[in-house]
């Protein structure tokens, strides 16, 4: 026989399970959003601190009237290499950018002719500068492959990459990107929005 009471009890249990599932979903989504907001605050605080330090050192050691089109002459291991400041500084946040942006101009070692002196392999530094020139004229969505040399000089070139970028393999455009967390436990639109925000945070910190 039809038992209306039992059906009502089952409906109530089903409603409670649905409410519990929805509550868990909201809790999980709120936690994910909080992680994003915490990461964004960390990055913004870090960037603000870096900007304050850069301004301090620029005032103390830099030179006035720095221009992107300034031609910088570098004595690299006895070979004179010339390049525009904007070419050398286009990889933002790297040692290359810090070295040639003008903030440390008064602290750089120089040769007898006033050129910036770098005690490094001149041919490999030329490879990096040539690649930077190519990068400066390439579309953003189609950067050149990272600079490379024959097997004999690969270790030294990787060492220079580490010296100038802080990483051996990943700071040059065209290299593998940092692996980001991938969220896939919500609806498609929500997953997409969260993952796009993670990507934006990575780009902000890069």
Image (cartoon, rainbow, N blue to C red):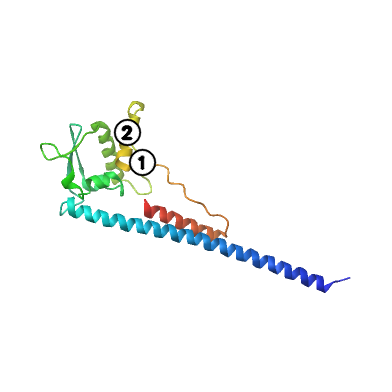
Q: Residue 15: percent from the left, percent from the top?
A: 70, 69
Image point (69%, 65%), residue name: 17
Quarter the N terminus occupies: bottom right
**Residue wearing tag 2:** 157
In the rendered image, the vertical position of residue 106 relative to residue 158, given as above or below: below
Q: Residues within 10 Å of mark 2 (few under 14, many from 20)?
A: many
Residue that lies at the very extreme toward the top in this rendered image: 152
Q: Residue 182: percent from the left, percent from the top?
A: 51, 52
Of residues 139 and 166, the one nearer the viewer is 166
Q: Is residue 56 left or right of residue 41?
A: left
Q: Choose the circle earlier in sequence order: 2 or 1.
A: 2
Mark 2 vs mark 1, foreground winner is: 1
In the rendered image, the vertical position of residue 139 relative to residue 22, given as above or below: above
**Residue wearing tag 1:** 167
Residue 87 seen by the camera = no
Badge number at residue 124: none
Q: Residue 168: percent from the left, percent from the top?
A: 36, 38
Image quarter for residue 122?
Answer: top left
Of residues 33 and 147, the one nearer the viewer is 33
Q: How many marks?
A: 2
Image point (77%, 70%), residue name: 9
In the rendered image, the vertical position of residue 193 relative to residue 6, given as above or below: above
Q: Residue 104: percent from the left, percent from the top?
A: 20, 48
């Amino acid at each position: 026989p039809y038992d209306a009471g039992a059906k009502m009890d089952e409906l109530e249990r089903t409603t409670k399970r649905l409410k519990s599932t929805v509550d868990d979903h909201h809790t999980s989504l709120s936690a994910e959003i909080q992680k994003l907001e915490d990461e964004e605050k960390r990055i913004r605080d870090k960037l603000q601190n870096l900007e304050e330090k850069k301004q301090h050192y620029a005032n103390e050691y830099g030179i006035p009237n720095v221009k992107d089109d300034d031609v910088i002459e570098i004595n690299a291991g006895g070979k004179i290499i010339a390049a525009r400041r904007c070419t050398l500084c286009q990889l933002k946040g790297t040692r290359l950018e810090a070295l040639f942006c003008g903030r440390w101009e008064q602290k750089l070692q120089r040769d007898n002719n006033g050129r910036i002196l770098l005690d490094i392999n001149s041919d490999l530094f030329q490879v990096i500068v040539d690649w930077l020139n190519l990068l400066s004229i390439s579309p953003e969505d189609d950067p050149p492959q990272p600079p490379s040399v024959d097997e004999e000089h690969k270790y030294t070139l990787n060492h220079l990459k580490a010296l100038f970028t802080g990483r051996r393999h990943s700071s040059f455009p065209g290299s593998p990107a940092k692996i980001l967390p991938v969220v896939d436990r919500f609806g498609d639109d929500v997953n997409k929005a969260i993952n796009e925000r993670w990507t934006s945070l990575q780009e902000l910190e890069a």
